[in-house]
Amino acid sequence: MAYVVTQACCADASCVVACPVNCIHPTPGEPGFAEAEMLYIDPKSCVGCGACVTACPVGAIKPESRLTPEEQPFSVLNAAYYDEYSHADRTPLALVPPQRRLVDPRPVRVAVVGAGPAGLYAADELLRHPEVSVDVLDRLPTPYGLLRAGVAPDHHHTKGAEKLFRAIEEQPGFRYLLGVEVGRDLTHAELAEHYDAVITCVGAAADKRLGVDGETLPGSLSATELVAWYNGHPERQDLDVPLDHERAVVIGTGNVALDVARILTADPEALARTDIASGPLDALAASDVREVVVLGRRGPDDAAFTLPELVGLAGLPDVDVLLDPGGADITATGERGRLLRDLASRERRPGRRAIILRFHTQPVAVLGETRVEGLAVRGTHPTLTGAETLDTGLVLRAIGYHGKPVPGLPYDDVAGTVPNDRGRVEPGSYVAGWIKRGPTGFIGTNKSCAQETVTQLLDDLDAGLVPVPPRRGEDLRERLADRGVDPIDLAGWRAIDRQEKHRGAISGRSRAKIVALDELRAAATSSLRETV
């Protein structure tokens, strides 16, 4: 019995190491690893031992016999990968070099700014060295960044990567200073006074703009804001999301656009079993939205969404997913092309909610007097260049993220990144994640990104390029306390986590997120707090 990978992966590669017959690719060290949309199991080589299932931290691997009808395309994807890529002439697994040790064994303290995947992977790489201790800071009282506030609530398997992060948190030398904002509570220079090095991993918090008239009307939002809203981000719970029109329009064809379309058309009863924030859940339960149109300026062959996400969307049991190629032919090959053509051949059934993937269509202006009332569009294919108005009360732009300037660090306004050399800004100051490379890759991509940055830091330490900071022996918490800032530590986060899970269990949910900053701080000091 063969096993099948059924979703985009965290790229942790635990399953690769666990497999006794080397049937999971691409592996670390092979072309495409960490950039691939997912890993693939060779059905001809798989012996059905199930070792990969135990090792997978996000529950992405299933026996072929237990795939649902909607998951069957993943069986084809796994097999097709090996038809296209032969691995007979490749190194079976990544060669694991001896563990590096620093030339000078003195204690090293590193501050990591940002507790999202990039920051926690950086902490993990650093803590492989017994000389190093790490303090992870974040401006929010909760860690995990986009894994908590960006992954769609119905993607519970992806959220399983929390298990990886919990293991990182439990390593000796790890400490949280949550609820501390660099640039508000202290400067980057002040932080650097306490640590041998600072790695900034603040992501790309802004979104790209459409640049059309009416973009600032109420009801014209970024998908970034909407995702944060329904995921319980404390700073987005007051977001005005008009759901009183039967149609919403999403501009962009990436995975975030598909996530937003799926959540807007989801069955509220199904959403109620996820960790979606309670306020947004109530709003979506009362929503009038019945149709979401996803617009792409180019053709379906150029869409940015990954194949695993498209497979999941196409298999929705209670929503019609249709495709309008906008006058273009679908020329994509393989499973992607087959699925695109299948969606283009479907017809909408009366009375059902629908997601329409519409291509070769460009927004011209957001229309309305005091709020969004429509979207003017035009065709971009030579055969269909006419203008049209789509009636809608909600327009969401999902055309990419953009990094914000980081106080105290240089900034490239065009790229939205901190200029760096493989993560090094200057000796003692480093970056990782989206603020380093731009908004590309998946959660697991941050692992190889962090490895590169930490290697630069260790090289600088060994070369004697990192000076000893003047206040290294002092605890930063004392400085923060003088300013009235009380950081939340690991025990505090564990207390928040327990309380959210306790609240969720009462209503049959995995978690009921606490969304108010004062309530989060109260939970961190509640009776559920334990010594970690």
Image: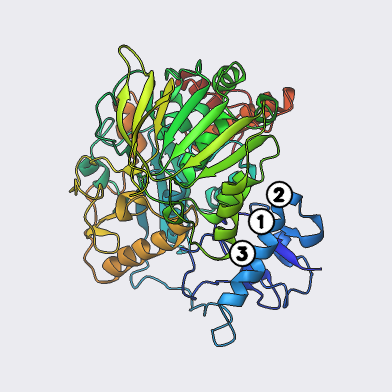
Residue to which mark 3 is pinned: 14
- Percent across and percent down for residue 361 are 38, 41
Callout 2: few (<14), some (14-19), or many (20+) C-alpha neighbours within 10 Å?
A: some
Which quadrant holds the C terminus? top right
Residue to which mark 1 is pinned: 6
Q: Residue at x 65, y 35 (%)?
A: 319
Quick check: can you spot residue 483? yes
Callout 1: few (<14), some (14-19), or many (20+) C-alpha neighbours within 10 Å?
A: many
- Figure quadrant of residue 184: top left
Q: Give the structural element (helix, strand or loop) at label 1.
A: loop
Q: Residue at x 60, y 40 (%)?
A: 321
Please state which of the two labelled residues, at mark 3 or mark 1, is closer to the viewer: 1
**In the orientation shown, which residue stands out farthest toward the bottom?**
89
The reply to whether dot 3 and dot 1 touch (C-beta < 8 Å) is no
**In the orientation shown, which residue stands out farthest toward the front?**
383
Q: Nearer the viewer, residue 524 or 318?
A: 318
Residue to which mark 2 is pinned: 70
The reply to whether dot 1 and dot 2 touch (C-beta < 8 Å) is no
Q: Earlier in the sequence, mark 3 or mark 1?
A: 1
- Give the answer, above or below, for where 149 lies relative to 414: above
- Percent across and percent down for residue 202 are 35, 43
Judged left or right of residue 187, residue 481 is: right
